[in-house]
């Protein structure tokens, strides 16, 4: 396709996406400005009140509700767990996948991307994060994967025909952004600095005076269905026909042949193009089979064939406006109420007239008056109870609409027992759990994208760092065809210092996402439960002391654990369950052997006694014979 054909196709696809998302984007932008920027008064009402000199107070309570949901998700981090599926999958290789994904997430600050996407989903109904490749450090040609945040969700335009909740069926996507004109000219030398025709309402394209200094570009992602031919080889491998043809000489030398008939399988090819308004600036053949942009949706509805996305604050905007109005009204009534005046007969205020004139605004030690009777002060009209009650009603309306009550927000309520408070908090978590669950779905799809990309990005022979659940780092060797799915011995090159290498392209793997406290929180909870167990069963203390010390966040906890571990019985020191079982079996065999030796010794002793008895009987018989011969003579 020529550049003109590509631009024409991209413009049509972009227009369809923009039309499909117009209502969602308009409502989302209004939610964002309302909840986070505090633009909660209608512009006409604000102008009228400003002209009249009347106040427009904004007491924004919505960010507290948003933080309640987002921070709850931050305390329960979703974690990707990879599992082998077929016989070629290896549990140890699955652990390498897990450790490598943890390394990717840590190095790219993936938790920032997840939290930002969820924050936008709760605030305005949609948020995004993306997966990208980066050049590895140390001036190499290796690449690493990274999870990146999308700071402006209005720069993303998804597939208007998508029905999946995690973008797994996206066939088109756009990322519209603007960059300084100098940066554009430095990156694409000689290219025409023509803006891509984007939606200015979302802020992706600069407008006004800044437009002349910036150029809008668009990433156009396109996924197409393709077919490929695979072959089954005599050594059990399954390779693509093109790969076999390119390495046929090697397979022939190894005596590997094709068995069975070729098979056609379906797959997808993803292409990324960077477009300006006039030309195609870059074209990249993406390694994976998914568009690496992941949405985190808020509340999702399908109405009239279109997806409607709603935020947590969408239905709470009217109660928030009512709250602002009634608090402003009560403040205005109190502020504009006349000061309590002094009443007295004519001429009573001639003495100290200046002090009487400032009695409502200044404090005087004394004020003199004329006449026999002192002036009397009129009472204050009082706080407008009706306006304050309406403000409280509006506050309760906000809580009931969002399902977050006083106990969920940490405020005191009618509940007195801990169980009742926890039950009310659980109700609040349940009413907003679909936002956290949508984040879990998004991270699950991100895991599929990573699982699809890792064998291709980390396919060359190299040493990578993997992380354990507790954050401990370990270096392992990876590479395609250098050891098989079950691992193998290394040779020369970058893997010479690694005892085992893993072929990440061998076997099939699937994943799950677990949501729960972080490893540190689980460790603290484990230590608490161990303490309770030792209190209930003190005899377990000598056996659990080293494990308890290792889970406590103390300076020198590891040294304490080592010292307590030295006090364990020999059969429990550093022994795995299998080793402990083997040791117990050896002990039983040793006892049986000792019993057998004792029995043999007893038998030998019995035989010795029998032989001695026979000797004595023979000696007695000889003595008797000699006595008989002597008597005859």
Image: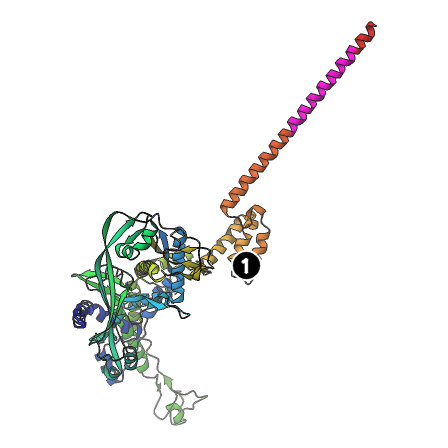
User: Which picture quadrant has residue 494?
Assistant: bottom left
Give the residue displayed 24% in from the left and 64% down from the top: 309
566 horizontally vs 143: left or right: right
Q: Residue 538 in the image: state x and y as whole percent.
A: 56, 49
Task: Read off the magenta span.
Answer: 601-625
Give the residue displayed 42% in from the left and 56% down from the top: 501
Report the front residue among 293 and 300. Answer: 293
Reply above or below: 238 against 497. Answer: above
Q: Quick check: can you spot residue 445?
A: yes
Quadrant where the image shows the N terminus: bottom left
Residue 10 colored in magenta in the image: no
Report the front residue among 449 and 198. Answer: 449
Q: Main secondary structure of the magenta part?
A: helix
Q: Residue 174 in the image: state x and y as whole percent.
A: 23, 69
581 horizontally vs 510: left or right: right
What residue is disc 1 on? Answer: 558
Reply above or below: 483 against 223. Answer: above
Q: Residue 352 in the image: state x and y as whole percent.
A: 41, 93
265 horizontally vs 483: left or right: left
Report the front residue among 323 and 79. Answer: 79
Quadrant where the image shows the C terminus: top right
Residue 605 colored in magenta in the image: yes
Q: Residue 629 in the image: state x and y as whole percent.
A: 80, 8
Label 1: how many Cα within 10 Å (few below 14, some 14–19, many 20+): some
């Amino acid at each position: 396709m020529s550049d003109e054909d590509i631009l024409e196709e991209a413009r049509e696809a972009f227009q369809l996406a923009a039309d499909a998302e117009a209502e969602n984007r308009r409502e989302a932008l209004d939610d964002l400005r309302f909840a986070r920027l505090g633009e909660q008064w209608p512009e006409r009402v604000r102008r009228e009140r400003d002209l009249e000199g009347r106040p427009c107070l904004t007491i924004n309570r919505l960010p507290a509700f948003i933080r309640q949901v987002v921070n709850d998700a931050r305390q329960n981090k979703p974690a990707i767990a990879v599992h082998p599926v077929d016989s070629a999958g290896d549990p140890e290789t699955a652990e390498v996948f897990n450790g490598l994904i943890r390394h990717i997430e840590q190095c790219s600050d993936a938790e920032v991307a997840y939290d930002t996407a969820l924050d936008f989903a709760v605030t305005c109904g949609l948020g995004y994060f993306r997966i990208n490749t980066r050049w590895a450090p140390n001036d190499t040609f290796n690449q690493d994967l990274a999870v990146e945040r999308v700071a402006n969700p209005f720069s993303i335009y998804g597939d208007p025909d998508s029905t999946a909740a995690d973008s797994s069926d996206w066939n088109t996507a756009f990322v519209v952004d603007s960059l300084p004109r100098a940066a554009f000219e430095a990156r694409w030398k000689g290219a025409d600095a023509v803006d891509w025709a984007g939606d200015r309402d979302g802020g992706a394209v600069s407008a006004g005076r800044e437009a002349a200094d910036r150029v809008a570009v668009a990433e156009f992602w396109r996924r197409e269905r393709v077919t490929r031919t695979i072959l089954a080889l005599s050594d059990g491998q399954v390779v693509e026909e093109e790969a076999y043809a390119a390495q046929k000489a090697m397979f022939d030398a190894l005596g590997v042949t094709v068995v069975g008939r070729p098979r056609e399988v379906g797959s997808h090819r993803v292409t990324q193009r960077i477009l300006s308004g006039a030309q195609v600036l870059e074209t990249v053949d993406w390694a994976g089979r998914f568009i690496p942009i992941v949405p985190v949706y808020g509340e999702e509805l399908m109405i009239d064939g279109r997806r409607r996305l709603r935020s947590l604050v969408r239905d709470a905007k009217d109660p928030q406006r009512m709250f602002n109005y009634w608090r402003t009204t009560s403040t205005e009534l109190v502020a504009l109420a006349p000061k309590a005046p002094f009443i007295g007969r004519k001429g009573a205020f001639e003495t100290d007239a200046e002090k009487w004139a400032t009695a409502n605004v200044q404090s005087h030690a004394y004020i003199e008056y004329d006449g026999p009777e002192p002036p009397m002060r009129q009472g204050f009209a009082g706080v407008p109870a009706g306006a304050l009650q309406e403000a409280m009603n509006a506050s309760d309306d906000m809580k009931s609409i969002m399902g977050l009550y006083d106990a969920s927000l940490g405020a005191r309520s009618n509940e007195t027992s801990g169980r009742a408070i926890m039950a009310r908090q659980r109700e609040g978590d349940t009413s907003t759990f679909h936002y956290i669950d949508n984040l879990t779905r998004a991270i699950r799809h991100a895991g599929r994208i990573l699982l699809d990309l890792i064998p291709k990005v980390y396919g060359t022979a190299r040493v990578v760092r993997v992380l354990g659940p507790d954050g401990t780092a370990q270096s392992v060797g990876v590479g395609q065809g250098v050891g098989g799915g079950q691992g193998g011995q290394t040779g020369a090159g970058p893997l010479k210092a690694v005892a085992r290498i893993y072929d990440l392209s061998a076997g099939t793997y699937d994943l799950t996402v677990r949501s729960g406290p972080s490893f540190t929180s689980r460790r603290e909870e484990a230590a608490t439960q161990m303490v309770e167990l030792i209190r209930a069963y003190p005899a377990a203390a000598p056996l659990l002391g080293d494990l308890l010390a290792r889970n406590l966040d103390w300076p020198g906890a590891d040294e304490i654990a080592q010292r307590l571990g030295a006090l364990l019985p020999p059969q429990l020191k550093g022994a795995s369950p299998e080793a402990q079982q083997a040791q117990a079996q050896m002990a039983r065999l040793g006892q049986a052997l000792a019993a057998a030796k004792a029995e043999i010794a007893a038998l030998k002793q019995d035989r010795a006694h029998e032989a001695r008895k026979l000797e004595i009987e023979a000696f007695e018989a000889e003595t008797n014979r000699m006595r008989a011969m002597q008597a005859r003579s």
